[in-house]
Image: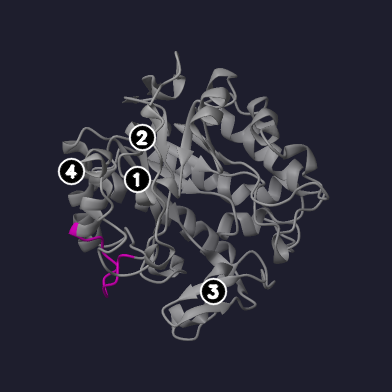
């Protein structure tokens, strides 16, 4: 096995307040291992993340900020003392193994389902069905028409994100990442298809972006902007109400420019996730997403989706990304950094155990030296 003469992916980097041993990021991955009534992380979570501590930075699965944010079965939260104590086991384990770890703060909005709320409707920007699927304890179910959030509920949710960030600090996390895009709550406000409000949170690009930016400001005030990252961008699956429109790119361009003013930890930007050739986002195919937003956001960018060692090195070398996030490869390769360094073959995850309540397919994938032995 051979390595390239220079691989910037494996060089140290300063991420605002954090010194990272390499530029490999473990991307957020929902795994559904909090199968308990408290939705608390367990010792299994601690083992799972500690096994992957050689990543320069771990960003956890999306974690619910309040019971009202829940929208995916068996996903942990970070609002209760029990949950905070559970996460402290994880952060201590990762730090003991030399790693750094941030938590992704999540509200699913209309991607949730009445099953989570004893029949009550989930909330969103407007009463528009996103036409997706919600992962409930009874299986995947079609989303429903949600209830529009009141302005008081929006203000409370901003405060909830700030409190979740304080809880994350108390749990020992090195920072937080706000899930600010894709199909979830903030993405629903950003979408001109879904957001039909006529108040200060709807209509213009500036109004549709207001909720996220108010949240970022509140979280940055709570724990410091250097400890806050945001995941946001126009990439979606191009399905249902999230098919891109002429409003999509200008909305996220505005968001990127505004985020640039906060001196944040990072912006996690997903590359294309669907065929964009016949959409208003056609120019963002390939590395176009990172090239376009690099000119708008001048802080640390974490590039994600369909990454390989060579592509990661090229993106960093070209200045289009500071770090590169790997998602599914981390499921079956706890020592992914070593495998990338040596160009070793990557193990493939068992699709039947990606989600589920047991250790199988979660903490039982062997490291490279055990495979060799």
State the extent of the magenta-drawn residues as a range: 33-43
Whether residue 318 sits left or right of residue 349 in the image: it is: right
Q: Are marks 1 and 2 in contact (CB under 8 Å)?
A: yes
**Pointer 3 or 2: first along the chain:** 3
Q: Mark 4 sits on what residue?
A: 92
Position of 346 relative to 138 (above/below): above
The Cα atoms of the two marked residues, 3 and 4, are separated by 35 Å
- Residue 304 in magenta stretch: no
**Pointer 3 or 1: first along the chain:** 3
Q: Are marks 1 and 4 in contact (CB under 8 Å)?
A: no
Q: Mark 2 sits on what residue?
A: 339
Q: 314 or 114, which lies in front?
A: 314
Give the mark toward the camera: 3 or 2: 2
Numbered disc 3: secondary structure: loop
Position of 370 relative to 83 (above/below): above
Position of 320 relative to 167 (above/below): above
Position of 296 relative to 94 (above/below): above
The Cα atoms of the two marked residues, 1 and 2, are separated by 8 Å
- What secondary structure do most residues of the magenta stretch adopt? loop
Report the residue at 60% width, 76% height from top.
Answer: 143
The Cα atoms of the two marked residues, 1 and 4, are separated by 21 Å
């Amino acid at each position: 096995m051979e390595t390239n003469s220079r691989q910037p992916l494996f060089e140290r980097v300063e991420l605002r307040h954090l010194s990272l041993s390499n530029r490999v990021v473990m991307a957020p991955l929902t795994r559904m291992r909090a199968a308990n009534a408290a939705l608390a992380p367990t010792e299994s979570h601690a083992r799972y993340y500690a096994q992957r501590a050689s990543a320069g930075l771990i960003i956890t699965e999306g974690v619910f900020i309040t019971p009202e944010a829940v929208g995916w079965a068996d996903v942990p939260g970070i609002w209760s003392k029990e949950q905070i104590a559970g996460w402290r086991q994880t952060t201590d384990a990762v730090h003991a193994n030399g790693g750094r770890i941030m938590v992704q703060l999540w509200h699913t909005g209309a991607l949730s389902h009445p099953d989570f709320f004893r029949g009550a409707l989930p909330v969103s920007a407007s009463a528009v069905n996103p036409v997706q699927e919600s992962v409930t304890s009874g299986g995947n179910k079609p989303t429903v028409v949600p209830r529009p959030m009141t302005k008081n509920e929006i203000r409370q949710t901003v405060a909830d994100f700030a409190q979740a960030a304080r809880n994350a600090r108390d749990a020992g996390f090195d920072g937080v990442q706000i899930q600010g895009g894709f199909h979830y709550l903030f993405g629903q406000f950003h979408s001109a298809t879904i957001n039909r409000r006529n108040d200060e949170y709807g209509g213009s690009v500036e109004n549709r972006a207001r909720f996220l930016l108010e949240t970022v400001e509140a979280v940055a005030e709570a724990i410091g902007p250097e400890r806050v990252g945001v995941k946001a961008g126009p990439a979606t699956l191009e399905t249902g109400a999230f098919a891109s429109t002429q409003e999509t790119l200008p909305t996220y361009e505005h968001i990127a420019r505004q985020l640039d003013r906060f001196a944040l930890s990072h912006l996690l930007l997903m590359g294309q996730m669907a065929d964009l050739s016949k959409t208003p986002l056609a120019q963002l195919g390939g590395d176009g997403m990172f090239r376009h937003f690099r000119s708008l956001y001048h802080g640390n960018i974490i590039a994600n989706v369909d990454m390989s060692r060579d592509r990661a090195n090229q993106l960093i070398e070209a200045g289009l990304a500071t770090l590169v996030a790997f998602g599914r490869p981390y499921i079956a390769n706890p020592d992914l950094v070593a495998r990338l360094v040596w160009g070793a073959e990557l193990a493939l995850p068992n699709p039947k155990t990606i989600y589920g309540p047991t250790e199988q397919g979660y903490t039982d994938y062997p490291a490279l030296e055990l495979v060799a032995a």
